[in-house]
Amino acid sequence: MGPVPTFSRRLKRELLNMQKELPAGIHIATADDLSTWEMDLEVLDQNPIYHGKTFRLRFKFGKNYPIEPPEVMFVRTADREIPMHPHVYSNGIICLDLLSTGHGWSPVQNVESVCVSIQSMLTGNTKNERPEGDSQFVMTPMRSVRDINFVYDDPTV
């Protein structure tokens, strides 16, 4: 038997740390294997759009994690909906530079920090709407979230 791949060691360590303690409003829903985890996320402030709601995030990890970001998206379940947000498409795909290789992702990020960032993104939202072009976007076939080349607004340019 060969050495344990880096992503396996890293994910096992992350899961162990998260089982001990997670920030308020973030809970492990499933983490039965090292390729896919689901996390439940609550917005803890009094944001009227999300008050009392819990959302589910699905993380899919590739062999190059943590060098490459996991694929992260909201998923609909029997008791979880996909949040209305200007950066969340109705199919659950999230437009967030943190989740993109070459943009905001860094190997120091982890599942917990991604959850906290998305929780913060929801907390700050004041618009109960989908991104522009949502209906057309969700009709476009794709193999993977990684196939999407989002264009991010950079106010410093």
Image (tube, grey):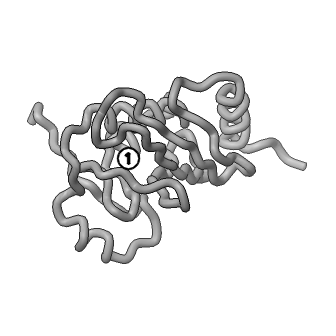
Q: Is residue 139 above or below residue 87?
A: below
Name the spot of residue 152 as percent of width and height, x first.
21, 46
Identify the amino acid type marked 1: Ser
- Residue lying farthest to the right in this orientation: 1
Dot 1 corresponds to which residue? 100
Q: Is residue 105 left or right of residue 40?
A: left
Name the spot of residue 133 as percent of width and height, x first.
18, 66
Q: Is residue 110 above or below residue 147?
A: above
Residue at (66, 53) in percent of width and height: 35
Q: Neighbour class for label 1 at 10 Å: few (<14), some, many (≥20)? A: many
Name the spot of residue 107 as percent of width and height, x first.
50, 33
* Residue 19, picture quadrant: top right
Q: Quadrant of the C terminus?
A: top left
Secondary structure found at label 1: loop
Residue at (78, 42) in percent of width and height: 4
* Residue 51, picture quadrant: top left
Residue at (46, 71) in percent of width and height: 143
